[in-house]
Image (cartoon, rainbow, N blue to C red):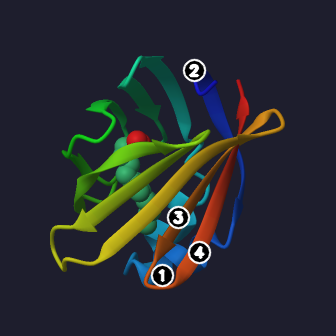
Amino acid sequence: AFNGTWKVDRNDNYEKFMEEMGINMVKRKLASHDNLKITVEQTGDKFHLKEVSTFRTVEINFTLGVNFEYSMADGTELTGSWVMEGDTLKGTFTRKDNGKLLITTRKIIGDELVQAYTYEGVEAKRIFKRG
Ligand code: MYR
């Protein structure tokens, strides 16, 4: 269901979330218009993702339930894993610099992919359309 290419369409509370994450205003402005595009290829419990934005192009491989490392576009490093809960992908990641948790989910709602983020009680969403 997640397979395919997804282009960000809109954000909900994303700037507030980035502020909580400690991202400065200039970077927040750029990041809210990053034209993020994610291509997902799932084979069983293995995922191959291609992330393309105005910041960078990166390829990410992970297996459900297996820890991996991920560097955010600003260089902040996370470690954690994704699991499937029903039809929802749930990611639990820890920031390496401060040990704080970042919880994220991806689910398909209608014809959109909704990614939700929670950090220190602040929630945000990015909503993607097939592209
Ligand atoms: C992936 O599946 O895309 C790789 C792992 C993603 C981990 C969570 C990413 C959170 C990025 C949040 C960016 C917020 C900027 C402050």
Amino acid carrying mark 1 in the image: Glu
Q: Residue at x 32, y 73 (%)?
A: 101
Q: CA distance from mark 1 to mark 4?
A: 11 Å
Check residue 123 in the rendering and tell me which mark sits there, or answer none: 4
> Residue 71 location, x and y as percent?
25, 51
> Mark 1 near mark 4, Cβ–Cβ under 8 Å?
no
| Residue count near mark 2 (Cα–Cα under 10 Å), binned few <14, some 14–19, many ≥20 | some
Callout 2: SS: loop
Label 1 sits on residue: 19
Judged by depth in the image, the label closer to the viewer, 2 or 1, is 2
Amino acid carrying mark 3 in the image: Tyr
> Residue 72 location, x and y as percent?
32, 54
Position of residue 4 in the picture relative to residue 97 (left or right): right
Label 2 sits on residue: 3
> Residue 70 location, x and y as percent?
25, 48
Foreground residue among 2 and 60: 2
Q: CA distance from mark 4 to mark 3?
A: 6 Å
Tell me: is circle 3 under 8 Å from ligand 1: yes
Q: Earlier in the sequence, mark 2 or mark 1?
A: 2
> Residue 24 location, x and y as percent?
41, 78
> Mark 4 near mark 3, Cβ–Cβ under 8 Å?
yes
Question: In which quadrant of the rendered image does the N terminus lie?
Answer: top right
Amino acid carrying mark 4 in the image: Glu
Q: Earlier in the sequence, mark 1 or mark 3?
A: 1
Q: Earlier in the sequence, mark 1 or mark 4?
A: 1
Q: Earlier in the sequence, mark 4 or mark 3?
A: 3
